[in-house]
Amino acid sequence: MTETIGYQVVRVLGKVEIRNYPPMVMATVKGGDDDRGFSILFDYISGNNEAREKVPMTAPVVSRRPGARIEMTAPVITDERTFSFVLPQGSDMKTVPRPLDSRIELISIPSRHVAALRFSGRAYYREVVEKEDELLTVLRGQAIRTKGAPFLMRYNMPLTPGFMRRNEVGVEVDVEDSIGGAER
């Protein structure tokens, strides 16, 4: 069974959850497509690291597409695709094995609030863009400020049938904006 990174739901806005995630470490590959990123990171967690240790697979797998809108005073475009594995809960930069592959970057993410919108099926580009727009529309309607670009979180192994897949689009949100009264 794959470990899923825990979080606490702090607010519900219809289909959107505002979550508090604990600090985490992500192994990230920049550029290329998802298959290439998955392969590089899978080699890393399978023992292609300085310690030659296997690292348990966790969910979600996180990706960010190029051209994703970053909501600020004016839209900013992120020009680089990223693909990341979240390392097991409780990992920190001192304890995770260092990658041998220079294309992998280990990134420490502090505790943060993320707005997430869940959907099932295969995460095709058009549907991901539509779900990102739906998420950002809900947040704008609640005057919740975002930080950075939206991202895709996938929770299932690649061979899982589409109708059984759990996907989410998410974006980091401002803490003060996100913890207002719960709307159910």
Image: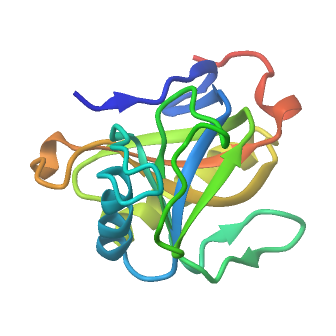
Q: Nearer the viewer, residue 63 or 143?
A: 63
Q: How is the image coloured?
A: rainbow
Residue found at x 68% / y 33%: 23
Residue found at x 37% / y 78%: 33
- In the image, residue 31 lies at what x, y percent? 50, 81
Q: Nearer the viewer, residue 56 or 109?
A: 56
Where residue 110 sits, quadrant-wise, is top right
Query: How many circles with numbers are drawn on the protein?
Result: 0
- In the image, residue 12 lies at what x, y percent? 59, 23
Measured along the vertical axis of the image, is residue 16 above or below residue 40? above
Q: Nearer the viewer, residue 127 or 84?
A: 84
Would residue 156 be found to the left or right of residue 14 on screen? Answer: left
Residue found at x 56% / y 60%: 133
Measured along the vertical axis of the image, is residue 162 above or below residue 21? below
- In the image, residue 106 lies at what x, y percent? 61, 56
Q: Which quadrant: the N terminus?
A: top left
Where residue 96 sits, quadrant-wise, is top right
Measured along the vertical axis of the image, is residue 56 above or below residue 41? above
Would residue 42 be found to the left or right of residue 146 on screen? Answer: left
- In the image, residue 58 lies at what x, y percent? 37, 38
Would residue 74 be found to the left or right of residue 15 on screen? Answer: right
Where residue 182 sits, quadrant-wise, is top right
Residue found at x 37% / y 44%: 53
